[in-house]
Amino acid sequence: MSQDLTEYRKDEYKKVKIPFGFNEQLQKVSLSLFHTFFVAMTGHGKTLGMKSLLLRFRELFPDWKVLIIDSKDKRDYADLNADIPLCFVEATDPLDLKNLMEPIVGAKMMYYFDKIIEEATFDTLGEIQRNIHKKVVDADEGRIKIHGKELGKLRVLDFTLAKLVALIEKPNIISELKLQDGFNVMPVSLPDVKNPNLKRAFQQLIARSTLLLLLSNPLYERTLLVLDENHKWNPQRYSSICKQPLSEFISEGRSQDKIVWLSDQALTKIDKEALKNVKIWIVGQQMEDNEIEDARNTVNSITDLSVTNKEIKTLKIGNFILVDGLHRTVEKVYLQPYGTPDEITQQIAKGADPELAEPYIREFEYKLRKSMEVDEDLVYKEICEKLRREREEMLDTIKDLKENFEKRVKEVREKAFQEAMAKVEEIKKEWKIEEYQITIVELKDKCANLETIVKKAQEDLAVLDEIKQVMGKLFPTVQAVSVPTEAMPIMPSITVAEVDERITQRLSSGPSPVTMVTVDVDQRIKELVKNEIINRIVTKIRALPESAKKAAWWLHEKRQANIRALYNYMFDRPPDETGRIPGTFYMNVVNPLQDAWLIVNEGGNIHWSLQEKLQAELKEVLTNSDLEKVPKYLASLLL
């Protein structure tokens, strides 16, 4: 079965044929490398034949890659031990969405197409579905109004896409196609998904993504694609998101050295339009009359050759009709299982029982499994090496994230500081704090002046007492009665002018001229008390530690809370965390705030009490305007 490939050149692969088996004349028959369709009923040997051809292909074309889409629940190609990640390309075009949802609902989606067009405005299926779901929820809860018929359409789209998006967003699905040398098996069987329509839509989406990436990437030249269960990708009854990509791959792939081998149990459920460029047909046994007729008509119309119903119906296991539309040949051939000797193959091709090949087939399957098994130590080494690389990449990523985080924190802090300063300026302007500060300075100056005036008045009062004493000595007969000046009698021994002169002389001989002032002593005492208490509160607020100021500002915003909530906030703990609160917290935060009249602690419940305390303690000396302005000024000292 081997061929001499020593003269094989890279650009001459199209001349090389793959050994297929023996015909009834015991002649060797080979398969041209072209787009091929393999059709046979279950149990006829299609999968065994496909594997045998694939292994021979790998021997003949070692520089080619083989990609197999394995879609059966009971996988056919798991023994190749060559699984690769699933790949996914977003499908947000309205027509693609319509074709994607038809397999899920099992019916045409033209009725919903206008709504699909309206909603397909996002870059991903997940965003589209979540936007539709939000509209449905908002309509149900009365936030928006949607006509009943339109809302019904949205419900169908939401229900349909939600299940598909849940499968797509699994972590084992990537956005690129990664092929290794040799065999690559993409398992899309999804045995855990019980809904066959949903499973088929997901499989179509993955197959479409694979076809698009494979056809568009020049790195994947010289690739053989194997698509089993063709009715899933190219159905006859309804649209499929795979139809157009598959048709383009068949029509354009060979010019890029990309070949596809298709297979299925029958042709009755398959759309034939995309198969017009498939020139090689391997036809196995069919038993249903309509399936036989469909297979015969399809093969004869595409290749313009002749295959009869009887030939198809009477084929034995392992025997196939090889229809080569390129070389215009039709032959009945026994497909030689890999590893089966030529002599046994020729006997079966001549009419012997196919059971003769069973021992060799079992041995082949066993060797296939063993050949695909790998050394566990080597696997572990590769895994360890991979984990080491991933760890290094993760550490580099963590380092970058840490640097970015620190940079971001710095930016946020600077921004927050600037915003806080701007807010302080706004508060200053709003509360006129600078005016209050100026007023306080002026009041202090006035207070000092008043104290000087009072002291001066006290001195003047002492002088007046001396004057009274002098007057008493000068005019011992004068009584302290209040009479009009014009009514005073003129003493015979001294005139009024002489009295005035003597008073003037006595006053001029005193320490200084007497300054007569009027002082409201009660109001002055009130001012002194108010200033003394407010200054004491200001001093205590300014002396608060930063932690207490932070707590005070939080309580100023909250107005009231319990000590546990304040403690959890101060130390960035979960709100519901419990445990013992240390005594230092009371000593450094709670007690200083109480001492500064900012809070009141009532059995673990605390509330902002500045205005309340001021009103209670200074109600006699504070005006209503003071009660409004003073707490704001004192609170501003916390910033």
Image (cartoon, rainbow, N blue to C red):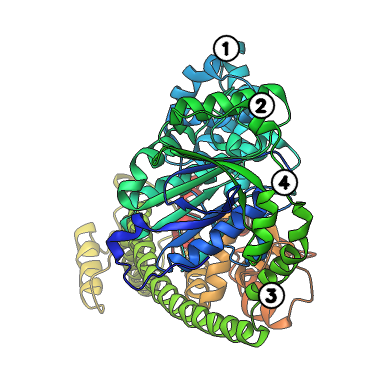
| Mark 1 element type | loop
For residue 58, side relative to residue 580 (left or right)? left
Query: Does the residue at mark 1 contact the one at mark 4 (Cβ under 8 Å)?
Result: no
In the displayed structure, 606 sits above or below 123; it is below
Q: Residue at x 22, y 62 (%)?
A: 500
- Name the foreground residue: 554 vs 516: 554
- Name the foreground residue: 380 vs 620: 380
> According to the image, label 3 marks what residue?
370
Q: What distance separates the C-alpha of mark 3 from that of mark 1?
A: 63 Å
First-in-chain label (1 vs 2):
1
First-in-chain label (4 vs 2):
2
Q: Nearer the viewer, mark 3 or mark 2?
A: 2
Q: Quadrant of residue 440?
A: bottom left
- Name the foreground residue: 388 vs 38: 38
> According to the image, label 4 marks what residue?
317
**Residue 291, label in figure:** 2
Task: Give neighbour class at mark 4: few <14, some 14-19, many 20+ (Cα, 10 Å).
Answer: many
Q: Is residue 607 visible?
A: no
Q: Is residue 125 visible?
A: yes
Q: Amino acid at mark 2?
A: Glu
First-in-chain label (3 vs 1):
1
Residue 457 location, x and y as percent?
36, 68
Query: Does the residue at mark 4 contact the one at mark 3 (Cβ under 8 Å)?
Result: no
